[in-house]
Amino acid sequence: MQALVSVIVPVYNIEKYLRECIDSIVGQTYRSLEIILVDDGSPDNCGAICDEYAAKDARIVVIHKENGGLPSARNAGMDIAKGEYLNHVDGDDWLESDAIEVMLSDIIEYDADMSCCGRYRVYVNGKRKRAEESLVPILVLDQKQAVMSLLQQKDGAGISAWAKLYKRSLVADIRYPRVKFAECAYGTIDTLLKVDRVVINTAGKYHYRQRKSGICGMGDSFLPEMIAYHRYYMKTIEEKKESLAGFATVLLMRRYLEWNYDYGKVPDDFLRFLWERVRAYYAAIIEDDDLELTKKEGVLLRALKTDRHLFKILGGGGEQDKETAAIAA
């Protein structure tokens, strides 16, 4: 008997794209699937489309529920999933025909807890682009390597819930929080802190549709939510895997610098939060060769450890970067 894979598809107001998504799952080369379509109170014809497909394919289960948002829909699917393995597909995205077969083969071959596949961004003009590039076709990562890779969205993978296959036993107690931004990322960091091994197959098997009506790419309107997520992963790592706190702090600093450059209005309380972590984990950061700090980052870390106001001046972006570069030299 082939292992059952539960594929969870949250569905809301996407009737234009839904058939392409479902067809790509129904047509998978790996046939032992439980396909859970979660109609999250969609106001269009999505619910009827889901029922239409369920009438034709016994592998499809449909949940009709009141609108509760994307995290609520994912959780509703996870609550009833019966598969040994779990996969998420957003209802406006689609898979290559062998996506699940490839991810399952990898998870078994490399005795991994989770496998990831490469992703394409698909734009409104029909063009597509690899989300993250990697020169290595297969990567097998331990927990530290996986956390560093996925949180930085390197090596062809990222922090999304989708484009991944999980052992259901790994994520049985993980649910996605009801937040406006990056709900995937909360679940991903919780999952990564439970894994022993992750395999990444960088072949592009998942197509991620870029829509103007989506929440991605909305810039500083989501800055408070981005900050909330970064506070969450920092505190979670401190609590559950403090040996990774140095890396988490460096990533926190990199994000602060990006936001400060792009938006110029990162709240001072977040700078204080970062400053406290640099002071606590500075020695661990300096001693960790895996972090591959640039000369500039070394300067900024020393400045932040000493005086967060000096760091704010040096790390402001634009012309101030020249001053930092001169100090580093």
Image (cartoon, rainbow, N blue to C red):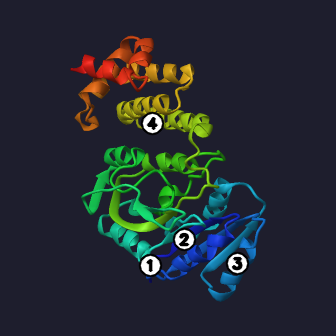
Q: Which mark is residue 97?
A: 1
Q: Amino acid at mark 4?
A: Ile
Q: Which of label 3 and label 4 is nearer to you?
A: 3
Counting other residues with Cα less than 10 Å from the Cα at mark 2, is it few (<14), some (14-19), or many (20 or more)?
Answer: many
The residue wearing badge 3 is 49
Residue 277 occupies quadrant: top left
Earlier-in-chain disc, 2 versus 1? 2
Q: Residue 320 location, x and y as percent?
A: 38, 20
Label 1 to label 3: alpha-carbon separation: 21 Å
The residue wearing badge 2 is 6
**In-image side of 167 versus 175 (left or right):** left
Q: Which of label 2 and label 3 is nearer to you?
A: 3
Label 2: which secondary element: strand
Q: Amino acid at mark 3?
A: Ile
The residue wearing badge 4 is 237
Earlier-in-chain disc, 4 versus 1? 1
Label 4 to label 1: alpha-carbon separation: 36 Å
Residue, x 25% and y 35% (percent of image)? 292
Q: As displayed, is residue 251 above or below residue 183?
A: above
255 and 122: which one is in front?
Answer: 122
Earlier-in-chain disc, 3 versus 4? 3
Label 3 to label 4: alpha-carbon separation: 42 Å
- Quadrant that contains the N terminus: bottom left
Specify the farthest residue to the left.
Answer: 329
Q: Which of label 4 and label 1 is nearer to you?
A: 1
Residue, x 71% and y 64% (percent of image)? 13
Label 2 to label 4: alpha-carbon separation: 29 Å
Earlier-in-chain disc, 2 versus 3? 2
